[in-house]
Image: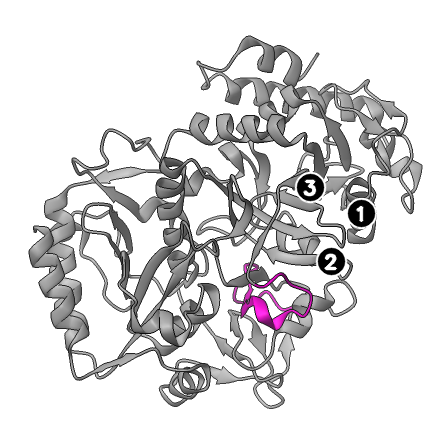
């Protein structure tokens, strides 16, 4: 299918009598409840269930092999190639399928808060609640911007259309296919709304570096003095939780760009994990769940419609989607200066890494490239217990370009702006998963606050760990026996064995970076 045919097919779909364009939040809430897609909860938020798939489907994600991009894409298990013929055939089927629907919903908006580099997008949805999700998660246009809006990328999303692998050339009924040439993201066979969000992020990770802008899987906030902090980490490591700080203004909770002007949010909303959510621990997130917000796979009492955030009977990957404006303490528009502090978050299921440590530049590059964490239950299909994983740049599932592109850009930014880098373990302490306990959020908050306030700049450190990390010997508000993970284990010898095991995994993983300098390997990685 050539571009002309794609545009004609798209225009034909958009001009149908069944299409609603840019409905308001109340209209979308009304549609979602009347159509039986959602129920209204006690706070005014809508609650939805995504059925069979309650997390991303990374094995069903493809990039079309096209002349415009095939020599740039880092092909492999993350960026799986698919032919233009398969894409074209599926695209025609999905468009034809959507034309038969009684109603379709279209959102027009942007990705990227910096007007110099933002991407104009449109989202075509079969479900009203999916369109509400898009409305809340992406950047909403003003009336003037809407009047002149021309989409540079389009999401076509048909959750109830299931592919036939034998005929359609996919691996399953589910597909998330990106065509850089046609500027189309085609999604089907899954109701999990996060596929829209991450697809647009992947597109920005392709486009922004070409403009000299570092795209990052991180949250960001800014203090009263204009000091900017970045929080890198995969889902479940605490990006959203730790960046939502009453004493700092939120820039964004998940996806950012770092240009010559500073940092900017790629999104217009937040997609927070809701498991065990309480007002006491996460007041900003808790209070953001109100009219217009979406609760995904959260169990709700059928009579009172009160959400039970502790109930994981549907999935552990429960989510809340809401606009940034649902939080009082934000930067609007979501742009700020250059970062002073960078925090790498990991949820270490081995219980080995310290709860906080200071990194040298070489260690920062090593741990950024490693991107170690544990995949937590529910964030992907098939993950039922935490699994150790290495996700390059803390975001490899969403990086279409080679990892070194992003790592080298970050290294230059750290040098240029003299940013301090910390590694924070929000995972297990006192033993591995099943033996130890998850690090207390109050302790993690105190350690992060100390780092942001410069209280760890000159503190005495212990550098004797297997990883050679500088572990502060004292942090305000944190018991000293918590800071060194070896001291937290009942059996120090067992800790040493587990630490060596993890260090070996780090080394094995790092072997794939053949072009990385020896200095980063020798000064940044494990020392024993």
Mark found first going from the N terminus, 2 or 1:
2
Residue 512 vs residue 307, the one in the foreground: 512
Residue 75 vs residue 288, the one in the foreground: 288
Q: Nearer the viewer, mark 1 or mark 3?
A: 1
- The question of residue 319 being in magenta is answered with yes
Q: Which residue is mark 2?
A: 245
Numbered mark located on residue 527 in the image: none
Q: Which residue is mark 1?
A: 449
Q: Which image quarter is the C terminus in?
A: top right
Q: CA distance from mark 2 to mark 1?
A: 9 Å
Q: Which residues are magenta?
A: 311-332
Q: Are marks 1 and 3 in contact (CB under 8 Å)?
A: no
| 382 up-or-down from 97: above or below | above
Mark 1: secondary structure: helix
| 33 up-or-down from 460: above or below | below
Mark 3: secondary structure: loop
Mark 2: secondary structure: loop
- The question of residue 24 being in magenta is answered with no
């Amino acid at each position: 299918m050539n571009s002309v045919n794609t545009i004609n097919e798209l225009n034909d779909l958009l001009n149908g009598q069944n299409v609603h364009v840019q409905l308001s939040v109340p209209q979308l809430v009304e549609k979602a409840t009347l159509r039986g897609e959602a129920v209204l909860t006690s706070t005014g938020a809508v609650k939805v269930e995504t059925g069979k798939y309650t997390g991303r489907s990374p094995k069903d994600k493809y990039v079309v092999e096209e002349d415009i991009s095939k020599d740039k894409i880092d092909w492999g298990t993350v960026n799986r190639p698919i032919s233009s013929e398969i894409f074209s055939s599926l695209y025609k089927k999905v468009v034809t399928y959507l034309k038969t629907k009684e109603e379709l919903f279209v959102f027009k908006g942007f990705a990227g808060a910096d007007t110099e580099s933002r991407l104009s997008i449109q989202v075509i949805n079969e479900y009203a609640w999916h369109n509400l999700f898009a409305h809340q998660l992406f950047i909403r246009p003003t009336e003037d911007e809407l009047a002149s809006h021309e989409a540079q990328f389009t999401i076509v999303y048909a959750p109830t259309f299931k592919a036939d692998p034998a005929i359609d050339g996919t691996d399953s009924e589910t597909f998330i296919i990106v065509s850089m040439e046609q500027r189309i993201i085609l999604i089907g066979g899954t109701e999990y709304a996060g596929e829209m969000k991450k697809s647009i992020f992947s597109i920005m990770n392709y486009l922004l570096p070409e403009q000299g802008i570092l795209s990052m899987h991180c949250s960001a906030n800014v203090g009263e003095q204009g000091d900017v902090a970045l929080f890198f980490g995969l889902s479940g490591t605490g990006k959203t939780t730790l960046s939502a700080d009453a004493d700092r203004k939120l820039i964004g909770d998940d996806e950012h760009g770092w240009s010559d002007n500073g940092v900017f949010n790629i999104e217009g909303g937040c997609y927070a994990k809701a498991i065990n959510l309480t007002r006491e621990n996460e007041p900003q997130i808790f209070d953001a769940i109100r009219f217009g917000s979406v609760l995904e796979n959260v169990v709700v009492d059928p009579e009172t419609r009160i959400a039970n955030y502790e109930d994981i009977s549907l999935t552990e990957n429960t989510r809340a989607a809401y606009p940034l404006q649902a939080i009082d303490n934000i930067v609007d528009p979501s742009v700020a200066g250059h970062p002073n502090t960078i925090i790498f978050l990991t949820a270490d299921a081995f219980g080995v890494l310290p709860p906080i440590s200071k990194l040298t530049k070489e260690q920062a590059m090593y741990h950024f490239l490693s991107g170690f964490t544990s995949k937590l239950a529910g964030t992907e299909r098939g993950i039922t217990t935490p699994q150790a994983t290495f996700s390059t740049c803390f975001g490899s599932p969403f990086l279409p370009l080679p990892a070194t592109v992003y790592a080298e850009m970050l290294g230059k930014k750290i040098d240029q702006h003299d940013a301090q880098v910390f590694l924070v373990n929000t995972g297990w302490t006192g033993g591995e998963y099943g033996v130890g306990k998850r690090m207390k959020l109050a302790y993690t908050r105190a350690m992060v606050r100390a780092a942001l306030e410069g209280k760890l700049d000159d503190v005495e450190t212990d550098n004797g760990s297997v990883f050679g990390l500088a572990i502060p010997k004292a942090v305000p508000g944190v018991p000293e026996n918590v800071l060194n993970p070896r001291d937290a284990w009942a059996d120090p010898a067992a800790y040493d064995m587990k630490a060596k095991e993890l260090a070996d995994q780090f080394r094995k993983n790092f072997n794939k970076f053949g072009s990385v300098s020896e200095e980063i390997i020798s000064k940044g990685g494990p020392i024993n």
